[in-house]
């Protein structure tokens, strides 16, 4: 089982899937936990460094990219590629600033770089996961103060690539304008899952907001499913398989 969320990242100690090795890679503010078929620390470090340099170079010329809480339009005269392009598009779709997509974008970029060296790759970046591989995985949801924290999860089939990203207004350092204990989004795009999870979290202030918020997020093209937790209330919508971690029973459905 892999945990999605933030608790001083102690969950990493218990998250190594059987048959894989795990290692940590840090480059400035980027702090990744990675599981793969062998230790790929050097290659992962090079990957993170390359993608960060690309992002930092763009921000130097476009400082609004770093600070905007709303979608921004790129200068059509300037070529945009790589994770910058993905973050801009994800922010536009989700209605948030592009930096809301940074953790998910980097997770995916690094995972795809490492896929040339390992058939199974899992990259976690502050509770935002990108997974590649044929084996089904169960991802536990850390929801802070909620009594449901650590008691529910989602089961996924990563295949050619799947992101599971979580935002929270009560757990961790990420900016959220809402009060969700956990706002989780599943997508094939790491950037989109991260940006949409941020927007889902922004929309959640009380349990009464859950239905409307899930409707909004799952209407975004590219979002496969979403989960919201506030206190003892949980809601889910889309193609998402919920799992009780107490007895491993499935609560799967398309809501």
Image (cartoon, rainbow, N blue to C red):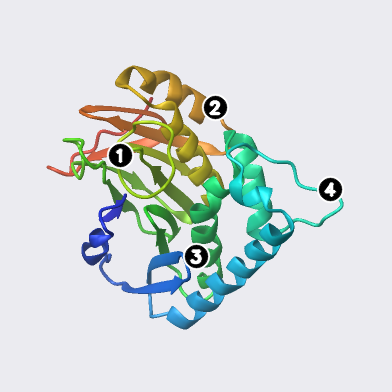
Q: Is residue 25 above or below residue 126?
A: below
User: Could you say which disc has been placed on residue 219 in the image?
Assistant: 2
Name the residue at the right extreme. 77
Helix, strand or loop at mark 3: helix
> Are the two marked residues, 4 and 3, in contact with CB atoms closer than 8 angstroms?
no
Determine whether, in the image, residue 240 is placed left or right of residue 93: left
The local secondary structure at tag 4 comes to loop
Q: Report which residue position mark 3 lands on.
A: 111
Mark 1 or mark 4, which has the lower sequence index?
Answer: 4
**Image point (43%, 33%), residue name:** 177
Estimate the x, y position of residue 212 in percent, counting from the top left. 44, 19
N-terminal-most mark, 2 or 3: 3
Image coords of residue 134 (percent x, y): 41, 59
Q: Spatial distance from mark 1 to mark 2, Cα to Cα?
A: 25 Å
Q: List the single residue furthest toward the left.
A: 247
- 2 or 4: mark nearer the eye: 4
**Label annotation for residue 76:** 4
């Amino acid at each position: 089982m892999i945990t999605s969320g933030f608790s001083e990242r102690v969950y990493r100690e218990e998250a190594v899937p059987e048959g894989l090795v795990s290692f940590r890679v840090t480059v400035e503010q980027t702090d990744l936990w990675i599981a793969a078929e062998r230790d790929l620390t050097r290659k992962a470090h090079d990957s993170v460094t390359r993608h960060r340099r690309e992002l930092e170079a763009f921000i130097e010329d476009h400082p609004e990219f770093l600070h905007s809480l709303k979608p921004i339009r790129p200068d059509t005269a300037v070529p945009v590629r790589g994770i910058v392009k993905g973050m801009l598009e994800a922010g536009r779709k989700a209605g948030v600033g592009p930096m809301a997509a940074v953790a998910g974008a980097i997770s995916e970029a690094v995972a795809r770089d490492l896929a040339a060296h390992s058939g199974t790759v899992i990259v976690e970046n502050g509770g935002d996961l990108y997974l590649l591989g044929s084996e089904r995985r169960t991802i536990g949801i850390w929801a802070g103060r909620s009594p449901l924290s650590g008691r529910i999860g989602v089961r996924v089939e990563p295949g050619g690539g799947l992101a599971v990203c979580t935002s929270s207004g009560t757990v961790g350092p990420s900016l959220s304008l809402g009060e969700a204990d956990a706002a989780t989004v599943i997508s094939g795009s790491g950037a989109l899952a991260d940006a949409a999870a941020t927007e889902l979290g922004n929309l959640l202030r009380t349990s009464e907001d859950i239905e409307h918020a899930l409707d909004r997020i799952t209407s975004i093209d590219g979002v496969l499913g979403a989960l919201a937790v506030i206190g003892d209330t949980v809601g889910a919508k889309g193609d998402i398989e919920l799992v009780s971690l107490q007895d491993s029973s499935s609560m799967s459905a398309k809501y």
